[in-house]
Amino acid sequence: MSLYYVQKLLYQLNRDPHVRERFASSRDSLLSEYELTAEERNAIADGDIGLLYVMGVNGQILMHYSALIGQNWDEYIAAMRGGVKVHGPVRGGLYTMLEDRKP
């Protein structure tokens, strides 16, 4: 998994209008410039917020991507919760499920 490249792309989508334009007009070409697995590429292309969350994408970065693809706040939160139900617990990054933590 190349979480760094997923987050880098999503960060750049948030910050750079030119990257957003390319994402809209030539998505496959843009995605090919990042070292992504097929699962990561598909999750980004499909706007699968739940899977991206489970992969470990930082919530601050992910929330901006969610807005970019047209989701409101409630849809974003529901997508993350749904991702855990469908794909299992968070795999990496800073986030883990609180109930899995031991004091």
Image (cartoon, rainbow, N blue to C red):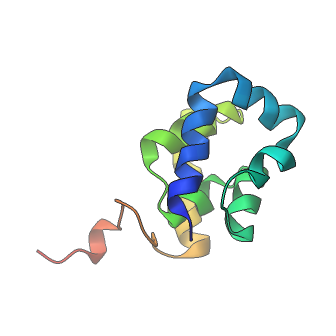
Side of 12 relative to 36 (left or right) = left
Residue 47 picture location, percent across and down: 72, 49
Residue 74 in sight: no
Question: Where is residue 70, by image quadrant?
Answer: top right
Side of 40 relative to 4 (left or right) = right
Q: Residue at x 52, y 39 (%)?
A: 63
Residue 44 in sight: yes
Q: Residue at x 36, y 61 (%)?
A: 95
Residue 14 picture location, percent across and down: 58, 30
Q: Residue at x 52, y 61 (%)?
A: 3
Nearer to the camera, 76 or 66: 66
Residue 88 picture location, percent across and down: 52, 76
Residue 73 picture location, percent across and down: 54, 35
Question: Where is residue 87, by image quadrant?
Answer: bottom right
Q: Residue at x 72, y 29 (%)?
A: 20
Q: Quadrant of the N terminus?
A: bottom right
